[in-house]
Image: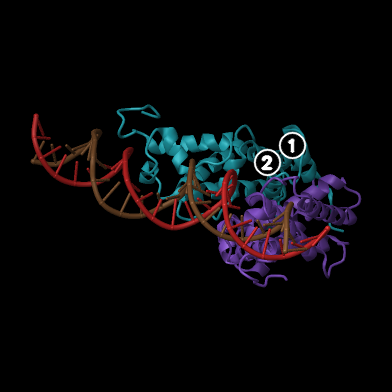
Chain colours: A purple, B cyan, C brown, D red
DNA sequence: GCGGTATGTTTACGATGCTCACATGAGCGT
DNA sequence: ACGCTCATGTGAGCATCGTAAACATACCGC
């Protein structure tokens, strides 16, 4: 099974092949088309429609996978943040994911959530919860919802600003430093 | 002059007509195509190419206009922020612009800056400077660059998260409140 | 074995961005 | 007033895309 070729007709594992091909294309260059995925899998241009209602459905599956990957990046080898510095590192991981896989990141976040895809909704909720838990753990005294939104937005905004070239830096390390600095700076600022 | 029709051939002001048609479409629904713009202007499908090298060029012009509009929203009837609360209001204005004209906002920020368009580059720089000036005015003691990035990213991130349905609220007012609350919360949080 | 169904194929439609060769006519110098 | 030229608009055409409908195949349970 898996991605092996079989007899000619009946690919054997088209759905998975399409997803991995799409994922690879997203990570290499930019745009993928259903037809290109079909070509890649050695299958007719409309075959993908046997597995995905339309392009959006395929993208939702990709998004769900991406969200799971993101969660791994944000948790694996890392305790739940206990200090402001830990939060900064979490933000760095978030932004680095976005910059390492920008096209995927856009698929994950760049459109309304399409409540039809259960796996996607769930994966998104897990990310949300993870970030919220981190923020409230470090700052239990502050309005939890507002702070969680702020932390997420800060990381998310930095990710987009760097992805879209609105902010620039020479290296990934430098971007990481800037993210840390931004977090530190806004936490150092005091409202009167 | 302006958008009046003339003889049939030689529209008279095609470039401007295309831009306003594109702007209107962006604000009404979603996608616009060059061909649709041409139709709208009552002109052949390839006429737009006399005025814009390609789709990106047209989008850059739209982006520049959008950035100028944003700057107006952020400055008109508003002093340069002098307090944390003022900063919150600035962020609210930023997010409200994004939610009022989301498709335009994506055109403005959703791709690398294309240094080819001088007017766009300049408009973008003005926004950047404006935000930076606001942040450093209110918090002169903190690392200016880092803080400016943080403030921008916070507003930008909230804009995207609400645009893309990752955060939700019932009304524009509620979103405004949440943005204010997020700003207040993160400024209230203290690093250790 | 047999048949139903999941999976692929073919063909087709309408749309898009863009190129290139051609048509028009507005504005200029004479 | 005349004629040129060049900016502007036209037309036909290409490659691509997403998607639908009708048809073909062969896997799997009986």
Give a yes or no on whether discs 1 and 2 share a subunit: yes
- What residue sits 45% from the left and 54% below the top? B116
- What residue sits 68% from the left and 51% below the top? A57
Picture layout, residue C1 above or below residue B111:
below
Q: Are marks 1 and 2 in contact (CB under 8 Å)?
A: yes
The subunit carrying tag 2 is: B
Q: Which mark is residue B176?
A: 1
Picture layout, residue A175 above or below residue B156:
below
The subunit carrying tag 1 is: B
Which residue has dot 2 on it?
A: B95
First-in-chain label (1 vs 2)? 2
Picture quarter with the C terminus of chain A: top right
Give me the C-alpha separation between circle 1 and circle 2. 8 Å
Picture quarter with the N terminus of chain A: bottom right
Q: In what element is the residue under mark 1?
A: helix
Of A94 and C6, nearer the camera is C6
């Amino acid at each position: 099974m898996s991605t092996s070729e079989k007899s000619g007709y009946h690919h054997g594992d088209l759905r998975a092949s399409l997803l991995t091909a799409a994922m690879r294309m997203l990570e290499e260059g930019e745009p993928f088309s259903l037809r290109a995925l079909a070509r890649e899998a050695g299958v007719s241009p409309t075959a993908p429609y046997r597995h995905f209602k339309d392009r959006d459905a395929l993208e939702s599956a990709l998004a769900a996978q991406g969200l799971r990957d993101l969660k791994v990046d944000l948790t694996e080898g890392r305790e739940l943040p206990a200090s402001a510095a830990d939060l900064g590192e979490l933000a760095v991981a978030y932004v680095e994911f976005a910059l390492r896989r920008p096209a995927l990141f856009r698929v994950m976040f760049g459109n309304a959530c399409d409540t039809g895809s259960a796996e996607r909704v769930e994966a998104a909720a897990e990310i949300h919860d993870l970030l919220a838990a981190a923020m409230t753990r470090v700052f239990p005294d502050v309005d939890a919802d507002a702070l969680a939104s702020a932390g997420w937005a800060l990381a998310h905004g930095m990710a987009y600003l760097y992805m879209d070239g609105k902010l620039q830096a020479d290296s990934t390390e430098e971007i990481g430093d800037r993210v840390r600095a931004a977090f530190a700076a806004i936490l150092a600022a005091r409202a009167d």
